[in-house]
Image: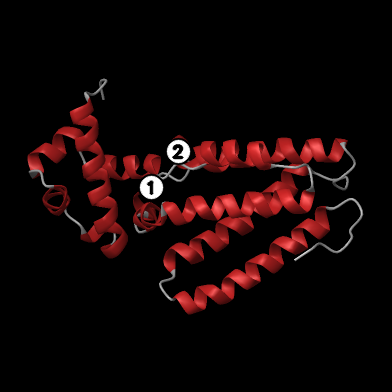
Amino acid sequence: MEQMTRIQQNTLRRIVEAAIELMSERGFHRVSVQEVGKKAGICEKTVFRYFATKKSLLDEIIRYRAYASELKREFENGRTWNLDHDLKLAARLYFQETKAKRNAFRAYLSALDSVDTNGEDFLRDPRELHAFLCDYMTAMQKKGKVRAGDVRLMVRAFVNTLHGYMLMYCLNDDGKSWGNKVASMKLTIDLFIQGFSQTGNSVTA
């Protein structure tokens, strides 16, 4: 799409946010382009000017839920080179971003059969998250604060666990049930920290 005016950018945002709201509640396949237009306060024809297909609208939702660049910036500003503090910070920031964009995650999760899970848009954020955490853990190894081992595997295990809890959060509407999972998640993160630590000492709660 060519460079857009501010009005066009606002219209695109309204379309995407309307689609996210509807699709997070009812699922991608149960929402029509006409309904998205109505929710956004514009006609169906205008929606198609911005998105030739419903699939292209889904691709924009995936880009909309981007989180890694902001997470990286806040992590680098807040890290202290203390493993316990920093991995808990990374987890907290990850879930803050997830919470802020929960409906966008729910919308695209409802359409995984239509998502190119090997595509650049889908993989950009997980790859960026993995890359900067690998850089951090490599630096911590050099400082003697993380045990020897394959940093990529350590980070992959940590990120995959966060991602699993994120999926449960996005798909779970039972607040009480999620509260129990939060306690489990905190313990899991503590175990990762203890396992990655050079000393293997118990971590603080």
Residue 23 vs 71, above or below: the answer is below
Give the labeled residue for mark 2: 119
In this rendering, position of residue 153 left or right of residue 53:
right
Give the residue displayed 80% in from the left and 35% down from the top.
Answer: 139
Can see residue 35? yes
Q: Position of residue 126 (x, y in %)?
A: 55, 43
The residue identified by callout 1 is 115
Residues under labels 1 and 2: Cα distance? 8 Å
Task: Decide: is 107 above or below 124.
Answer: below
Depth order, front residue of 89/34: 89
As displayed, is residue 36 above or below residue 75?
below
Residue at left offset 81%, top offset 62%: 203
Q: How is the image coloured?
A: secondary structure
Q: Callout 2: 10 Å neighbours few (<14), some, many (20+)? A: few
Lateral position of residue 31 relative to residue 84, left or right: left
Q: Nearer the viewer, residue 50 or 74?
A: 74
Q: State yes or no: discs 1 and 2 in contact (Cβ < 8 Å).
A: yes
**Which residue shows up at 73% across the image and 43% down it?**
152
